Amino acid sequence: MCEANVYLKNKDIEELLLERVDKIIPGNGEVYLENIFGERKIVAARIKELHLVDHRIILERIETN
Amino acid sequence: MCEANVYLKNKDIEELLLERVDKIIPGNGEVYLENIFGERKIVAARIKELHLVDHRIILERIETN
């Protein structure tokens, strides 16, 4: 299976947000995530980079003022 | 290997843009793509959705006026 782990980068720290993610839909200052177990998360972030061979996706938190 | 095919959606038509993509970096109205063969493309688009289990990533062309 080719899902990926999604990490949220907040300043210099990366934390694992959701494992084995299948579906990702960005939009309107948020990113929707859904993994192969049906778990869903919506986070205020943008996609920073994808490294699919490493199963690794980095999101970056959107700063709110 | 868990790379994905990247499709570019332009209005209602999806065309295959690059196969077996490993690395994707969005930013500044563009998306940078690099596949496992070292081919690189930069397109004026945004990420619309990712379906990793299906190895399928959809970009949406950014309309220029």
Image (tube, coloured by chain):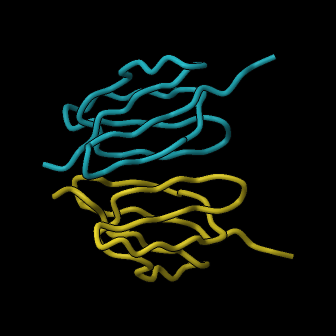
Chain colours: A yellow, B cyan
Q: Name the residue nearer the viewer: B58 or A37.
A: A37
Furthest-right residue in this view: A65
Q: Is residue A19 left or right of residue A41?
A: left
Tell me: B54 left or right of A58. left
Residue A9 picture location, percent across and down: 53, 74
Residue under the image location 49 percent in, 17 percent down: B13
**Residue in the foreground of this view, choosing between A59 and B7:** B7
**Quadrant position of residue A65:** bottom right
Q: Please state the horizontal and vertical placement of residue A34, each as a whole percent of the image.
A: 42, 65
Quick one: which residue is furthest to the left in this view? B1
Q: Is residue B51 above or below residue B60?
A: below
Q: Is residue B45 left or right of residue B21?
A: right
Q: How many marks?
A: 0
Q: Is residue A52 above or below residue A57?
A: above
Residue for point 38% across, 22% down: B17
Residue A36: x and y in percent read 29, 67
Which residue is located at x 59 percent, y 38 percent?
B46
Q: From what the image shows, is residue A3 above or below residue B33? A: below
Q: Quadrant of residue B48?
A: top right
